[in-house]
């Protein structure tokens, strides 16, 4: 009876792990979020799913009102308004924009473009400074919720096998 329980637990663990991995890798949409630093600067995170089998380098750029804010492509020239105020980087599957001197005049629409294949994919968000959360460690946890959930649920299941 004990052996049957162990085998059943192993099957449940394998199924749950494969299911969670499938859900995590099956997400193809972009996710955009933003927050305000203590210095009143804007930080935006554009999370994407890496394209499988693409030999093109990943590039990311942000635009607002048809103006280029910043790009990871060095040949793209940002609007002079943002030239010395914006920094952009790609780490793993997240494109991060830091915009210094973020103004509170009116809500603006920001669009993140990710180019991994021939055509870029985009996601937009309206940013209102008065409604932004302050950037914090908890904000980072919220941005990576799927990975955190996967880690929290997988390790206890795997520990049952040991």
Image (tube, grey):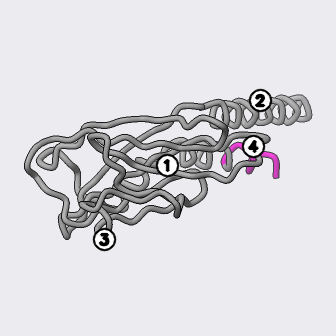
User: CA separation, marks 2 and 1?
Assistant: 23 Å
The label on residue 27 is none
Of the residues tagged 4 and 1, which is closer to the observer? Answer: 4
Answer whether labels 4 and 3 touch (C-beta < 8 Å).
no
Q: Is residue 136 magenta?
A: no
Residues packed near mark 1 inside 10 Å, few (<14), some (14 to 19) or many (20 plus): few
* Left/right of residue 18 with respect to residue 6 in the rendered view: left
- Disc 1 target residue: 144
The label on residue 84 is 3
User: CA separation, marks 2 and 3?
Assistant: 50 Å
Mark sitting earlier along the chain (4/1): 4
Residues packed near mark 3 inside 10 Å, few (<14), some (14 to 19) or many (20 plus): few
Q: Secondary structure at mark 2?
A: helix
Mark sitting earlier along the chain (2/1): 2
Of the residues tagged 4 and 3, which is closer to the observer? Answer: 3
Q: Is residue 157 magenta?
A: yes
Q: Secondary structure at mark 1?
A: loop
Mark sitting earlier along the chain (3/1): 3
Is residue 18 depicted above or below 50 in this figure?
Answer: above
């Amino acid at each position: 009876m004990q052996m049957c329980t162990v085998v059943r637990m192993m099957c449940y663990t394998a199924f749950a792990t494969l299911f969670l991995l499938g859900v995590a890798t099956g997400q193809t949409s972009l996710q955009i979020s933003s927050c305000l630093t203590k210095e009143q600067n804007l930080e935006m995170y554009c999370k994407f799913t890496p394209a499988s089998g693409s030999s093109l380098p990943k590039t990311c750029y942000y635009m607002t009102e048809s103006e280029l804010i910043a790009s990871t492509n060095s040949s793209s020239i940002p609007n002079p308004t943002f030239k010395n105020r914006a920094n952009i980087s790609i780490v793993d599957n997240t494109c991060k924009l830091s915009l210094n001197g973020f103004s509170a005049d009116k809500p603006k629409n920001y669009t993140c473009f990710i180019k991994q294949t021939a055509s870029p994919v985009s996601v937009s968000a309206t940013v209102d400074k008065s409604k932004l959360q302050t950037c914090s460690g908890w904000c980072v946890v919220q941005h990576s919720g799927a990975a955190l959930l996967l880690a929290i649920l997988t390790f206890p299941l795997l520990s049952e096998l040991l």
